[in-house]
Image (cartoon, rainbow, N blue to C red):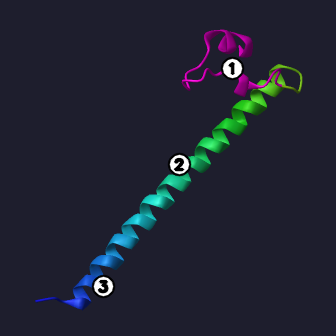
Amino acid sequence: MENPERDVERAQEAMDDSIRRLEHERDRLEQDIDESRKELHHMEEATGGEVAGDWRDTDDASGGEDPEGAAKRE
């Protein structure tokens, strides 16, 4: 026998779980952004206000980092 009320409860629980996971992921991403901003700020201070070059052009097509590009940034 079907129990529509229980189905609604399960759907609500699943939605609540999804919301909690998304909120956790959002918090983690916001923390990553904050850490990246701090790192950028430190790099800017170390280089006199500007970070030389565009870091995006130092990655190869596979998504891995090009060692020469990494050396340029260091």
Residues shaded magenta: 51-74
User: Is residue 53 rendered magenta in the image?
Assistant: yes
> Mark 3 or 2 closer to N-term?
3
The residue pinned by badge 1 equals: 58
The residue pinned by badge 2 equals: 28
Is residue 21 left or right of 62 when viewed as pictured?
Answer: left
Q: Nearer the viewer, mark 2 or mark 1?
A: 1
Question: Looking at the image, do the residues carrying marks 3 and 1 touch, with CB atoms under 8 Å apart?
Answer: no
Q: CA distance from mark 2 to mark 1?
A: 26 Å
The residue pinned by badge 3 equals: 8
Question: Looking at the image, do the residues carrying marks 3 and 2 touch, with CB atoms under 8 Å apart?
Answer: no
Q: Residue 74 sits in which quadrant? A: top right
> Mark 3 or 1 closer to N-term?
3
Is residue 39 left or right of 63 when viewed as pictured?
Answer: right
Q: Is residue 3 above or below residue 44?
A: below
Counting from the top left corner in percent of width and height, residue 58 is at 69, 20
Q: Residue 51 sits in which quadrant? A: top right
**Residue at (53, 48) in percent of width and height:** 28
- Dot 1: within a 10 Å radius of its alpha carbon, few (fewer than 14), some, or many (20 or more) residues? some
Q: CA distance from mark 3 to mark 2?
A: 30 Å
Helix, strand or loop at label 1? It is helix
* Number of on-image labels: 3
**Residue at (32, 77) in percent of width and height:** 11
- Dot 2: within a 10 Å radius of its alpha carbon, few (fewer than 14), some, or many (20 or more) residues? few
Q: Amino acid at mark 2?
A: Arg
